[in-house]
Image: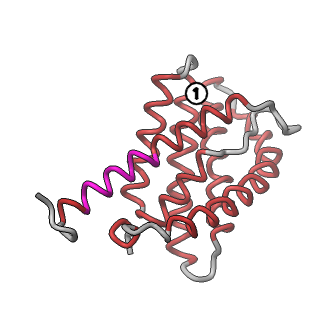
Amino acid sequence: MFTKGSEAMKKIQKLTFIAVLVAQALILHIIEGMLPVIFITPGAKLGLSNIITLTSLYMLGFKDTFAVLMLRIILNGLLAPNPSGMIYSLTGGVLSLLAMQVTKAIGKENVSLIGVSVSGAFFHNVGQIIASSIIIENINIVLYLPALTLAGVGTGIFVAITSNYLLKALKKLPFYNSLVDY
């Protein structure tokens, strides 16, 4: 039915891989919700699902990563008991992905995976602060940004290191080259 290098087979492999990434991001998000809060800063989290977002950005490119992100947010929104969490995930996630794409594109060879990840972590926090200020109708929540930024730098580094190992492992997949967005 399919020849080994056929375009249809490549599309099926890519769609399947995207589905696996969405499932992994969703599982990591759920696991993170079960972890005890380890930060002094209330609301700060490790951002485990961002490992998948960053990995996807480097493997599949912006368009497919946007799909992975949106599917994860929508599915989590359907499963989560807190609908306002979807607003925070949406604003933080989209702003983070845009920042990572811009940083990656502008930085090219001069900005490492860690730099891209930290910029994403920072703008994820900015997105959540924007959402919070709209929801609670108080701009003073911006004063919380420095504390979130400090936590975000640490989590951004953790996400980048983990994504780096994951990318190295994924390069060993036999169909890796058919997935990568050059």
Q: Quadrant of the C terminus?
A: bottom left
Question: Residue lying furthest top in this view?
Answer: 81
Region in magenta:
10-21
Q: Which quadrant of the structure image shows residue 38?
A: top right
Element at label 1 = helix
Question: Residue lying furthest left in this view?
Answer: 1
- Residue 14 on the magenta span: yes
Taking the image as shown, residue 129 lies to the left or right of residue 94, namely: right
> What color scheme is it?
secondary structure
Q: Which quadrant of the structure image shows residue 163?
A: bottom right
Residue for badge 1: 85
Taking the image as shown, residue 13 lies to the left or right of residue 94, namely: left
- Residue under the point 54% across and 22% down: 80
Tell which of 86 and 3 is nearer to you: 3
- Residue under the point 40% across and 69% down: 174
- How many neighbours does mark 1 have within 10 angstroms: few (below 14), some (14-19), or many (20 or more)? some
Q: Position of residue 6 (x, y in %)?
A: 17, 67
Taking the image as shown, residue 33 lies to the left or right of residue 20, namely: right
Q: Position of residue 43 (x, y in %)?
A: 75, 33
Question: From the viewer's perspective, is residue 18 above or below residue 118?
Answer: above
Question: From the viewer's perspective, is residue 98 above or below residue 35?
Answer: below
Tell which of 67 and 14 is nearer to you: 14
Q: Position of residue 110 (x, y in %)?
A: 62, 82
Tell which of 13 and 40 is nearer to you: 13
Q: Quadrant of the N terminus?
A: bottom left
- Magenta-colored segment: predominant secondary structure: helix
Question: From the viewer's perspective, is residue 115 above or below residue 79?
Answer: below
Taking the image as shown, residue 54 lies to the left or right of residue 45, namely: left
Question: Residue lying furthest right in this view?
Answer: 40
| Amino acid type of the residue tagged 1 in the rendering | Gly
Q: Position of residue 143 (x, y in %)?
A: 79, 40
- Residue under the point 53% across and 60% down: 55
